[in-house]
Image (cartoon, rainbow, N blue to C red):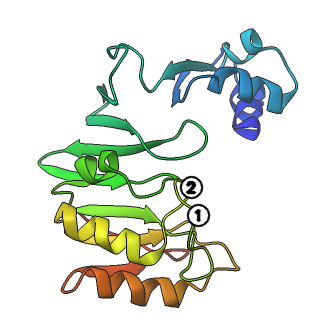
Amino acid sequence: MCGYYVARKYLPGQEQPLPQLEVWGPAGTRERIAKAYDTEAPECDTVFAFRGLMEGAAADAVQNTFQLGPFTVTAARVDHPVEAYALRLEADGSAFVYSGDTGPCDALDRLAAGADLLLAEASFQEPRDDGLHGVHLNGREAGECAARAGAGQLVLTHIPPWTDADLNLVAAKDAYPGGVVEVARPGSVFTI
C-alpha cells in the first residue's frame, strides 16, 4: 500500500490528482497505512478513501454486505487474534470466497456456503500445529470447511515455506472427497 500510495500521489506527468481509491479494511486501517508510510492519516486521504468493512452494519453484526463495482461483497468477522475478515464476492450468479487468516469458525462456513471457489489459507500443518486454535487453518480444516459449504472448488493459499504444501493438499483432499482441491501457485488461474 505504501508503494501504491507513492505511485498514485507522485506519478510523473500527472497533471491532476487521481481520484481517491476506495480501500476497505478492518478498524484502524487508515492509521496503520499512514504509520507504515510514516505520515499523518489525513495525508493518506488525498489518495485513498478508507472504508471500514463493518461500516454501516448494526453494532452486533458479524457480517456486512455492500456493493463494490459489479460485485456484492460480504465481509464476515472470523476467528483470529486480531480483527480479521473473510470475504465473499458475488457477480452474475457466481461466488468467490477468501478465508483470510482464521481458525475454523461458523462465520467462515456460512460465508462459504455454495461458493464456486473457496480460496482458503492453510498455514498450519498437522500434527505440528495441533492445539493452536483461532489463528490459521490447516489443510484438513480447509477441506472440512469446503465440504460443509458445498464449495465447487477449494484452493489452498497462504502456506509458508516451513509448511509442507503437499501434506496440506493431501489432508484437504481427504477431508473433501470428490472435491476439486489445488494449491495456489504463481501464475495459477481459476475460472468461476
Residue at the top extreme, as displayed: 42
Which residue sits at x=77%, y=32%? 6
Q: Position of residue 182 (x, y in %)?
A: 38, 80
Task: Point out residue 94 in the picture as x, y percentages from the top left corner.
Answer: 17, 52
The residue carrying mark 1 is 132
How many marks can you see?
Answer: 2
Q: Are marks 2 and 1 in contact (CB under 8 Å)?
A: yes
Q: Residues within 10 Å of mark 2 (few under 14, many from 20)?
A: some
Q: Label 1 is placed on what type of residue?
A: Leu
Q: Quadrant of the C terminus?
A: bottom left
Would you say 35 lies left or right of 122 here? right
Whether residue 146 is situated above or below residue 83 in the rendered picture:
below
Q: Which residue is mark 2?
A: 135
Q: Amino acid at mark 2?
A: Val
Whether residue 151 is visible to the viewer of this picture, yes or no, is: no
- In this image, 59 relative to 129: left or right? left
Mark 2–mark 1 distance (CA, rounded to whole Å): 7 Å
From this view, report whether residue 55 is shown above or below residue 160: above
